[in-house]
Amino acid sequence: MAIMNHKESWGLIARLLHWASGAVILFMLGLGVYMTQFVTDIYAQFGLFQTHKSWGFVAFALGILRLVWRAVNPTPRLPDGMTGWEIRASQLSHGLLYLLIFALPISGWLMSSASPLQDSYGIKNMVFEQFEYPDPFVPGSESLETVFGTIHTGSAIAIGIIVMIHILAALKHQFVARDGLIRRMILGR
């Protein structure tokens, strides 16, 4: 089992980072919807928001690791038979996924940091209760909180759509093109 990527296959590290990022993103999208749309108890919501912030840090860290790993490893070739528009769509969607992997946690952090409630109640933005995010907005600003909240929500919707397209494209490769793309991302060969 190869650790590094090759022209024909994804290495173990790239595959682990891919699936871990996907799992964290899906978890965060679900948690975000749940805590903002279905939980009405403010104390329960507070705990969920702190969990969301912590996992947002994990999503950001995984994004950094993915970029570093991608920079030092060759990207395997795309499957034979992909048309020009499919190649361009793949490149665009992957670029947007990387952009949103960073836009979501950064906008979430800035939104939380800008919240006037944080300063009023002495709430710290903690990562798994181990360390505190820096706070660039003291005192908080409701207008900045709104701006970053809009960016955060828009980014969440966008990444949800792009992840859905990503999954549908992978299924197309598996069941229509039958080109082994999913096997390469699961088994590396």
Image (spheres, rainbow, N blue to C red):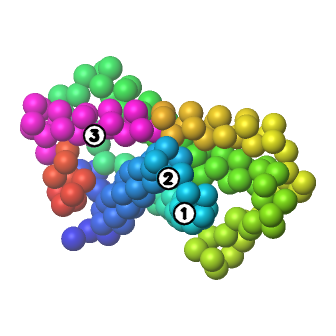
Position of 8 with respect to 119 (left or right) is left
Q: Amino acid at mark 1?
A: Ala
Tell me the number on the disc at residue 44: 1
Mark nearer the N terminus (1 vs 2): 2
Q: Residue at x 41, y 50 (%)?
A: 30
C-alpha separation, residue under disc 3 versus residue under disc 1? 32 Å
- Image check: 177 left or right of 149? left
Give the labeled residue for mark 3.
167
SS class, disc 1: helix
Across and down, in percent, residue 170 comes to 23, 39
Q: Are marks 3 and 1 in contact (CB under 8 Å)?
A: no
For the residue marked with disc 3, what is the amino acid?
A: Ile
Q: Is residue 91 above or below residue 24?
A: above
Q: Position of residue 69 (x, y in %)?
A: 47, 60
In the picture of the structure, the residue carrying the numbered disc 2 is 39
Q: Going 61% across and 58% down the picture, which residue do you hit?
A: 42
For residue 173, side relative to residue 118 (left or right)? left
The part of the chain drawn in magenta is 159-180
**Looking at the image, which residue sits at the far bottom?**
130
Q: Secondary structure at mark 2?
A: loop
Foreground pick, 181 / 8: 181
Marked residue nearer the N-terminal end (3 or 1): 1
For marks 2 and 3 on the same chain, the one whose residue lies earlier in the sequence: 2
Give the left or right position of residue 41, taking residue 130 as reference: left
Disc 2 versus disc 3: nearer the observer: 2
Out of 50 and 110, give the one closest to the viewer.
50
